[in-house]
Amino acid sequence: MRDLWDFDSLICSDSIIAGVDEAGRGPLAGPVVSAAVILNKEIIIENLNDSKKLSPKIRLAVYKEIIKNCIEYQVGIVDNFTIDRINILEATKLSMKTAIEKLDTLPELAIIDGNQYIDISIKQKNIISGDSKSASIAAASVIAKVTRDLMMDEFDKKYPEYGFAQHKGYGTEKHIAAIKKYGPCEIHRRSFEPVKSY
C-alpha cells in the first residue's frame, strides 16, 4: 500500500495533485460517475487500493476515511440519456472534466486513470492502470465506485424487478433475463446491446 503513496510523491512531490478515475463504463444501466480527489499527503489511509480489489465492506470503510481525511473531493455524474446521445467514451471524459472543474482547490496536476486526454485547463498526466499504482487515483476509484453503487441501490428501490442492488446495472444473466421479461426501464442505456434489441 505504501507504494501507492510513493508513486504520487515521485510524480509530483511538491505540488497539489488530483487523482481522477471513473466507475460505470460497462453497465447496461445507470450513469457513469467520475471522482477527482486531492489527498492529504500527511495521512495514510489504511486499506486504500484499487476499488475493484476491495470487498464492499472494506471499500465503504475506505470511502468514509477518504472523505474524512482528504483535502477535497468532487464527483461528476453523466446520466444514461447523455451516454446514449454522445457515447460512453465521451460521457466518461465529460464526467471526469466535471469532477475536476468542480474542485475549489485548484490542483497543479491531474493524474488520470487510463489513456484519454481530458479537455481541462490544468496540466494532466495519464496513468495506465493508475488505480493500482497511485494513491490519489485509487482514492478516486473508491469514491466513484461507492457513489455509483449507492445510486444504483436507490434505483433498485424504484425498479426492484431488475435487481440493480445486486449487479449495479452490469449485464449479468439475471439482469438480461429481467430486460427480456420487462423491457428496458428509464435508466437503461438504449445504445447498449442487448438493451437496444428490446
Image (cartoon, grey):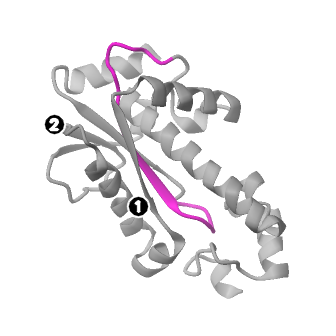
Can you tell which quarter of the image residue 118 is in?
A: bottom left
Q: Residue at x 21, y 59 (%)?
A: 119
- Label 1, secondary structure: give it: helix
Measured as percent of width and height from the top left, residue 67 is found at 47, 31
Residue 168 visible here: no
* Side of 107 where 2 appears, left or right: right
Q: Residue at x 33, y 21 (%)?
A: 40
* Side of 150 where 68 appears, left or right: left
Q: Which residue is mark 1?
A: 92
Q: Which residue is mark 2?
A: 108
Measured as percent of width and height from the top left, residue 97 is found at 30, 56
Measured as percent of width and height from the top left, residue 186 is found at 65, 77
- Badge 1 crowding class, 10 Å Cα cut-off, few under 14, some 14 to 19, many 20 or more, is many
Measured as percent of width and height from the top left, residue 125 is found at 23, 42
The mark closer to the camera, 1 or 2, is 2
Tell me the kind of residue under disc 2: Glu
Q: Which residues are magenta?
A: 25-45
Q: Is residue 99 above or below residue 139?
A: below
Front position in the image: 103 or 144 = 103
Front position in the image: 105 or 82 = 105
Q: Identify the disc placed on residue 34.
A: none
Quadrant in which the C terminus appears: bottom right
Q: Residue at x 63, y 84 (%)?
A: 196
The majority secondary structure of the magenta stretch comes to: loop
| Residue that sits furthest to the bottom in the current view | 197
Q: Residue at x 61, y 27 (%)?
A: 61
Tell me the kind of residue under disc 1: Thr
Marks 1/2: CA–CA distance: 22 Å
- Badge 2 crowding class, 10 Å Cα cut-off, few under 14, some 14 to 19, many 20 or more, is some
Mark 1 or mark 2: whose residue is earlier in sequence: 1
